[in-house]
Image (tube, grey):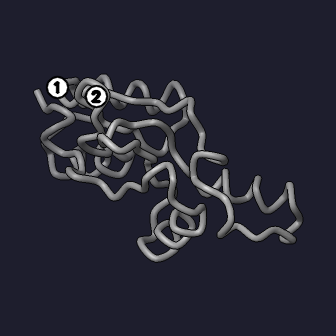
């Protein structure tokens, strides 16, 4: 049985909720990621900034908006899908399928400890650690 903690990305990139939205946008582009978790001062997960959120921001203001004056907290998605690190990869795969998600944020309590992507699950199937029939 493969657990989320066995394949997740540990210590993921995150931004403080007080950071400028520009910081999140730069991370998304420079790190080639589709979203970045938002945390409070004690590393507790409070939201997520995604490419979709950035597109909504652009659409709302038609590009005529000075993003550096606004924080991640103002534009983050707060309805974030999470999973515990001791959950099985089969459970994670079922969540991905049911909700059409790209990523699950891995938490322990309320602390952000990792990110599990669909690609992590696919890689694990490719590597033979998880049977496609069990997913």
Judge from the rendering whether residue 37 lies leftward or rightward of residue 54; answer left or right: left
Q: Quadrant of the C terminus?
A: top left
Judge from the rendering whether residue 48 lies leftward or rightward of residue 90; answer left or right: right
Judge from the rendering whether residue 90 lies leftward or rightward of residue 34; answer left or right: left
Residue drawn where x is 46% and y is 76% of the image: 30
Q: Pointer 2: residues within 10 angstroms few (<14), some, or many (20+)?
A: few
Q: Earlier in the sequence, mark 2 or mark 1?
A: 1
The correct choice, above or below, for 4 with respect to 28 in the image is above
The x, y position of residue 92, in whole percent, is: 33, 29
Residue drawn where x is 76% and y is 70% of the image: 66
The x, y position of residue 38, in whole percent, is: 45, 47
Image quarter of residue 88: top left
Identify the element where label 2 is drawn.
helix
User: Which mark is drawn over residue 133?
Assistant: 2
Q: Quadrant of the N terminus?
A: top left
Which of label 2 and label 1 is nearer to you? Answer: 1
User: Which mark is drawn over residue 86?
Assistant: 1
């Amino acid at each position: 049985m493969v657990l989320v903690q066995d394949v997740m990305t540990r210590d993921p990139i995150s931004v403080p909720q007080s950071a400028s939205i520009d910081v999140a946008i730069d991370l998304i582009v420079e790190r080639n990621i589709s979203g970045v978790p938002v945390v409070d001062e004690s590393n507790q997960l409070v939201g997520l900034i995604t490419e979709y959120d950035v597109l909504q921001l652009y659409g709302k203001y038609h590009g005529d908006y000075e993003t550096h004056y606004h924080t991640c907290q103002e534009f983050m998605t707060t309805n974030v899908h999470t999973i515990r690190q001791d959950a099985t990869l089969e459970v994670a795969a079922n969540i991905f399928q049911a909700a059409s998600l790209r990523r699950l944020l891995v938490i322990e309590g309320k602390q952000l400890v990792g990110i599990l992507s669909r690609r992590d699950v696919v890689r694990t199937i490719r590597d033979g650690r998880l049977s496609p029939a069990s997913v």
